[in-house]
Amino acid sequence: MANTVVLVISVHTTALLSGACVVRMRFPGDRRASSLRLWLLVPILLIYPVCLLALQGCAGFAVAESTAMVDWQPPANVPMTIRTLDADSRFSEVSSVAAAERLHALHPGEPLNILALSGGGAYGAFGAGAVAGLTRTGSRPDFTVVTGVSVGALVAPYAFLGPMWDADLLEVFASGPGQDLLQSRGLGVIFGSSLYRGKPLQQLVDAHLSETMIQAIAREAEKGRLLLVATTDVVTGMPVVWDLGAIAKNGGPNARTLLRDVLVASASVPGMFPPVMIRINKDGVPHDQAHVDGSATMPFFVPPAFVQTPPEARGGTNRTLVYVIIDGPLGDAPKTTRLTTRAIFARSIHAGLNHMLLTTLELTAATAQLQGATLQYSAMPATHPRGGPYEFRADKMRPLSRYAYECAQAGRLWTPFGRTDDSSGTSRNITETPEVPCPADDAFIKYFASR
């Protein structure tokens, strides 16, 4: 980027100076020549400080890997790895295959319940209400593994810690404390890395990431449970999966800062919020990495190695159960789109992200079925009245959270993948449900599961 700016300076400066010289040759000794040369020098004086500021802005956010590019190889057919923190506060990468083997060794003969939470901005209220509503059914699974991406990463610690944290979860997502998240950077937008300030999101996470929560996460991790959150490395463009339980256990005095930075990074939408610089000690060498929203590379994740069910357990009650909560609709109904650059660009990005979501859900379900596991999922019906994904006001988030809570309480939350009946996968209670059909009753959600 810096090279590009220098080129622009050279071209514009040369052109302006050349213009001044030509004028001087055409009007030797004329007052008009002096006036015109002075007029032409004004843009030059303005261009230089602006370009210098641009160079500073680019340099301030430049990050690079410590390893040479010639040593880097693109990952191909490599199992997903998990970044974990050891007792010496050093990060290392652990294969998801090895992590899965350890899970099965620590929970012999037990079913592995896996919960995956997607991104979705303000639609995270749906996931929060769904998780809390499951408690009221009396059939909320004890999740062995909880994974989260973007806003799902902010829901994940509460889902991981269990029903005792439901009230705190609903307070975060139903009371609208994040309605001031979108604070413009003002003129800083021109040379900065985002439209909005990152401080409000950091303060929101700080306010709820208490020492009590960190200690509770560490205790659950000691039992062999996993809390995993994904971010996207700005340099490599690849997802990074963090073991938050290991950070809570082994992070020492830096645990809170590390946990906060990972959670904030996972929810930092590129371009909207600035990247988060995370300092890690890897292979004995400390260095900084820039990370952004995990959903930039995957809408949610379930490590394929985790869904493997031993052959002897595939027909019984000990097989792996996967639950996916999509914080948003699976697809949007057709709508009028103005044929303007901005409208077409926005619609295209939305369509691409939605396609990636559907593809990931299909691949995860297919992997689960091949490995003898089952998958159930839930998503917002496209017909559900809602605001935008970045409307963090309480009057938008509270009704959505309540809707998901009531659907979960009524046993109409889950749709099993690969079945055509209307069973929700949970016991159905005779309670009053919202006027809008619940996820288990939505025609498109059922169709997508059975096709």
Image (tube, rainbow, N blue to C red):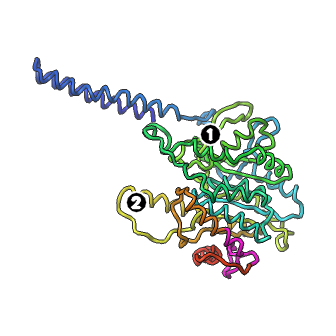
Q: Secondary structure at mark 2?
A: helix
Magenta region, residue range: 405-427
Residue furthest top in the image: 29
Mark 2 vs mark 1: which is more N-terminal?
1
Q: For the N terminus, which image quadrant?
A: top left
Is disc 2 in contact with disc 1, using a CB cutoff of under 8 Å? no
Q: For the C terminus, which image quadrant?
A: bottom right
264, 393: nearer the viewer: 393
- In the image, taking residue 166 as reference, residue 402 lies left or right, namely left
Q: Is residue 171 placed above or below 50 in the rendered structure?
A: below
The residue at the point 64 percent across, 77 percent down is 450
Q: Residues within 10 Å of mark 2 (few under 14, many from 20)?
A: few
The residue at the point 44 percent across, 57 percent down is 346
Quadrant of res 400: bottom right
Residue furthest right in the image: 108
Secondary structure predominantly adopted by residues drawn in magenta: loop
- What residue did someone put label 2 on? 344
- In the image, taking residue 231 as reference, residue 139 lies left or right, namely right
Residue 87 spot, x, y in % from top left: 82, 38
Quadrant of res 425: bottom right
Indicate whether residue 407 is drawn in magenta: yes
391, 109: nearer the viewer: 391
Spatial separation of the CA atoms under disc 2 and disc 1: 36 Å
The residue at the point 53 percent across, 69 percent down is 385
Indicate whether residue 353 is drawn in magenta: no
Residue 445 spot, x, y in % from top left: 60, 74
- Which residue type carries mark 2? Ile
- What residue did someone put label 1 on? 72
Residue 260 spot, x, y in % from top left: 68, 43
